[in-house]
Amino acid sequence: MADQDAHFRIMDEALKHPDGRAKGGEPCVVCSNPVSPQAHWAQRDRHVCSSHCNSLLRRRYGRGSATISSARIEAALDTVGPRPNPRTSGPRVFRTAPDEPLPIEWEGYGPMPGDIVERYGVVTMFQVTEMPSEYYTSRIIVSFVETGEAFIAGATEEGWCSSLVIGAHSPAGQRHEDFLGHKFMVQSVLCEWRRERITDLQPDAIDYFFWECYAAVPVDAPKYREPMQSPRYRTEMDRRKRVSSNTSRHERRARAEAKIDRFDPLEVYERDEWMCQICGAEVNREVLYPDSWSATLDHIVPLSRGGNHTRENSALAHLYCNLKKSAN
């Protein structure tokens, strides 16, 4: 699938308030009520006080309201405009990989003409066809097997699957009513059409994209895990959750004038080589919170005394050591 989340990235960038993230007390751009310092970071980025006002601001953007300046939208387009297809290879074979976390190969937004998708011994080929002007989509992508059975979906200008699904078709061109439930034979193997939608990361790990296609698969082949996410994507999403949770938790405890950085606690743990900076003993990375000897982030100058939530003011400590220090 092409970079269809670009609209949302551009909107997110355009709706950011020019004064930066609200610290608390700033007037909401929609209703003028004060923005809470405990509000979600996205709401504080936009200077809105509630999810209701956030929805109203998004609607203004969708309607092209004059309150969202064209200069901000143009700047957002320059910053986060549509991303290029991350695929680097030419026509190739995408094979089954049963021993991998995801049992199939993929690359980029989806297969293109000249590619072959092999799934458990069954081969699917692809072609993009321009449609007449009176047709309800300008182009289609056709997945087909050697017997002539085909699955048709809408295609973007670049030739990747769009959100339009037309359905399974017989070799004679007749559309099957049972959609993905249609069964057919390929070399004496009973097959069905299966949708593949894998979430992956762009090479710079900032934005995500989807590989999407329809491929013929034996009926008795293992079902794909849902949601289908690349290992890179899952690792990055876990990291972002840690960053968000770590930042919001300490931001609530810090004083209003404190500096708050967004970072992954693992950065500090790795920097400190998994050694507790209070007692000097090793911290076992396999021990998880709330065990007394699990890893925690200690602020060298405590937040309650005006310390900053930064990498420089943070250190690795056992939970026990951290609590003992706080008690003193």
Image (tube, rainbow, N blue to C red):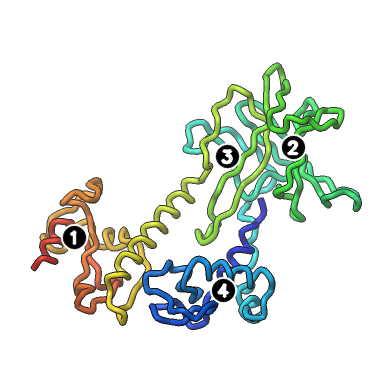
Query: Mark 4 or mark 1, which is nearer the start of the sequence?
Result: 4
Residue drawn at x 54%, y 50% is 200
- Amino acid tagged 4: Leu
Mark 4 vs mark 3, CA separation in Å = 37 Å
Lower sequence index among marks 4 and 3: 4
Displayed quadrant of residue 220: top right
Q: Which residue has dot 3 on it?
A: 105
Distance from label 2 to label 1 (Cα)?
55 Å
Residue 58 position (above or below residue 186): below
Relative horizontal placement of residue 309, taking residue 292 as reference (left or right): right
Q: Quadrant of the C terminus?
A: bottom left
Evaluate if marks 2 and 3 touch, with contact meaning CB atoms under 8 Å apart.
Answer: no
Q: Kindly identify which residue carries mark 4.
A: 15
Mark 3 to mark 1 CA distance (whole Å): 41 Å
**Secondary-structure class at tag 1:** strand
Q: Nearer the viewer, mark 3 or mark 1?
A: 1
Q: Position of residue 316 (x, y in %)?
A: 22, 61
* Tag in front: 2 or 3: 2
How far separated are the C-alphas under marks 2 and 3?
17 Å
Determine the CA span between mark 4 and mark 2. Answer: 40 Å
Name the residue type under label 2: Ser
Task: Residue type at mark 3: give it.
Answer: Glu
Instruction: Judge by depth and name the residue closer to the eye, 14 or 93.
Output: 14
The residue that appears at 72% across and 27% down in the rendered structure is: 182
Q: Which residue is mark 2?
A: 143
Residue that badge 1 annotates: 317
